[in-house]
Amino acid sequence: MAAEPIVAIRELSKVYQQGEINVTALNEVSVDIHEGEFVVLMGPSGSGKSTLLHIIAGIDRATKGSVLVQGINVANLNESELADWRNQNVGFVFQSFNLIPVLTAAENVELPLLLTSLGRAERRRQVALALELVGLGDRGHHRPDQMSGGQQQRVAIARALVTDPTLIVADEPTGNLDAKSASDVLTILQSLSRVSKKTVIMVTHDPKAAHFGTRSLHLEKGEIVAD
């Protein structure tokens, strides 16, 4: 018997209102994503891939349809519940690294843990583990301006990992990186999927980046046209 999907999306639609006009970003999308998959969302600009990622991650809300993550219908959560759910279940990696310049790498990675009940010693242990996983165990005391773009993105991945989330969502994570740094970052995400059984969902325009995933979903005009 097949395992239950970790993410179950059913007839998901998102319509934005721009003045008098309704713009359909997603049109009745249905898809299952399983534990340990590295799913790549591809498609032209405006195809709905970032909208889909943001709805799965609880950053945006659908107009209709459902998103179940580990059996919880994210659409039914109020704003406070949604914020708690995101902090416990989703690790975010974005194109711009979103690190706080005055904080060290370790302090940036620790930020999501400050919203938990963990004590200082346990927070530091988890930060050290996360930095070790991305190959930056010796760079915890460096600030972002003392690191390369690739290293900063690895710090961002460590920050995404540190709460041991159900999902890691990445929106164009290699968009600001050179080819070598991009490959390093994608290899880490691939390893998290293969070795740590993390479920990774990534938006990218880059076909080379897509090869690191286990599966690609191609969106056009708000619909999945190829899997």
Image (tube, grey):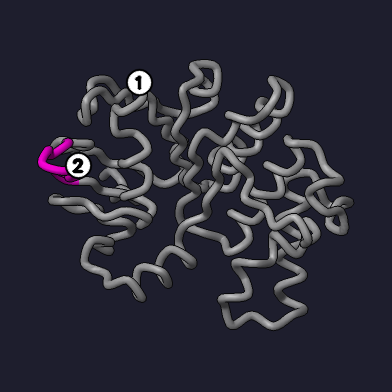
222 on left or right of 33: left
In the picture of the structure, the residue carrying the numbered disc 1 is 44
- Residue 175 position within the rendered picture, expressed as x and y whole percent measured from the top left: 58, 29
Q: Amino acid at mark 2?
A: Gln
Classified by dominant secondary structure, the portion drawn in magenta counts as strand
- Residue 67 position within the rendered picture, expressed as x and y whole percent measured from the top left: 24, 53
What residue is at 86 percent from the left and 53 percent from the top?
142
In the picture of the structure, the residue carrying the numbered disc 2 is 18
Name the image quarter holding residue 117. bottom right
Which residue lies most toward the front here? 19
Q: Amino acid at mark 1?
A: Pro
**Marks 2/1: CA distance?**
20 Å
The residue carrying pointer 2 sits among few (fewer than 14), some (14 to 19) or many (20 or more) residues within 10 Å by Cα, namely few
Secondary structure category for the residue under label 1: loop
What residue is at 35 percent from the left and 21 percent from the top?
44
**First in sequence: mark 2 or mark 1?**
2
202 on left or right of 160: left
- Residue 137 position within the rendered picture, expressed as x and y whole percent measured from the top left: 83, 52
User: Height in image: 61 above or below 110?
Assistant: above
Secondary structure category for the residue under label 2: strand
What residue is at 45 percent from the left and 61 percent from the top?
89
Point out the image quarter for the N terminus.
Answer: top left
Q: Nearer the viewer, residue 51 or 163?
A: 51
User: Height in image: 48 above or below 142?
Assistant: above
55 on left or right of 108: left
Q: Which residues are magenta?
A: 10-23
User: Height in image: 138 above or below 219?
Assistant: below
Q: Is residue 11 magenta?
A: yes
Q: Is residue 54 magenta?
A: no
Question: How many marks can you see?
Answer: 2
Q: Nearer the viewer, residue 8 or 14?
A: 14
What residue is at 65 percent from the left and 37 percent from the top?
188
